[in-house]
Image: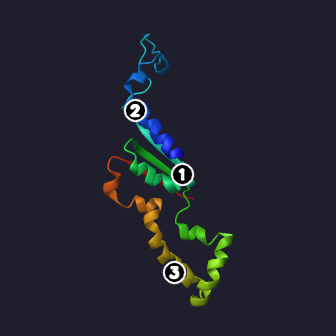
C-alpha cells in the first residue's frame, strides 16, 4: 500500500501543474522572485532498506518517474539467509536424508538459488533493457 501511495503522490505532484502555482509551493529567492519549488523535471530517487530493498527493485523498475535507486541490505541471496532461520530445521531433516555432507547441501542450496534469482533484486536487475534511464546501487551486508 505504501508503494501505491508513493506512486500516486509522485504522479500527482509531477502532473498537476496548477498545484505548483499555489503560493505554498513557491520559494523566495535572494532577488525577491518566487520560483517554483517543484517541477516536472525534479528527479525522483528511491532508497529501500531491508524489505524495501527486497521489493524495491521491482517497484523502481515499474515506475516511470524513478531515475536513481539504492537498495540497501536486501537480504540476498535468499538461500544464504534461509539456512540461518530457526524454521529451516524442518527442511533440513529431509534434505539430509538425500545429501549427507554439508558442502553438498550448500551446493544444492546454490542450485536452488538459481530458481529464486528472478524473484530477487539482483534477478530483476539482470535485464539491462528494463533499466533504461535508471541507475541502481545494491548494498549488501
Residue at image coords 43%, 23%: 19
Q: Earlier in the sequence, mark 3 or mark 1?
A: 1
Tell me the element at label 2.
helix
Residue 67 on image: x %, y %: 39, 43
Residue at image coords 52%, 57%: 54
Residue occupied by mark 1:
52
Residue occupied by mark 2:
14
Looking at the image, is 28 positioned above or below residue 86?
Answer: above
Tell me the element at label 3.
helix
Q: Nearer the viewer, mark 1 or mark 2?
A: 2
Q: How is the image coloured?
A: rainbow
Residue at image coords 55%, 79%: 106
Quadrant including the C terminus: bottom right
Residue 15 on image: x %, y %: 37, 31
Label 1 crowd (10 A; few <14 / some 14-19 / many >=20): some
| Residue 36 seen in the current view | no
Tell me the element at label 1.
helix
Residue 62 vs residue 125, the one in the foreground:
62
Q: Is residue 36 left or right of residue 88?
A: left
Looking at the image, is 131 positioned above or below residue 108?
Answer: above
Amino acid at each position: 500500500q505504501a508503494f501505491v501511495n508513493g506512486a500516486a503522490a509522485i504522479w500527482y505532484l509531477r502532473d498537476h501543474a496548477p498545484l505548483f502555482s499555489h503560493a505554498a509551493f513557491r520559494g523566495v529567492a535572494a532577488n525577491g522572485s518566487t520560483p517554483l519549488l517543484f517541477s516536472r523535471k525534479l528527479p525522483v530517487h528511491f532508497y529501500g532498506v531491508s524489505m524495501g530493498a527486497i521489493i524495491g527493485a521491482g517497484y523502481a523498475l515499474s515506475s516511470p518517474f524513478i531515475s536513481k535507486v539504492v537498495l540497501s541490505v536486501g537480504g540476498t541471496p535468499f538461500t544464504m539467509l534461509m539456512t540461518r532461520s530457526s524454521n529451516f530445521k524442518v527442511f533440513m531433516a529431509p534434505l539430509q536424508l538425500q545429501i549427507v555432507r554439508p558442502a553438498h547441501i550448500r551446493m544444492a542450496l546454490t542450485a536452488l538459488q538459481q530458481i529464486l534469482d528472478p524473484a530477487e533484486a539482483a534477478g530483476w536487475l539482470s535485464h539491462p533493457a528494463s533499466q533504461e534511464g535508471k541507475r541502481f546501487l545494491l548494498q549488501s551486508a
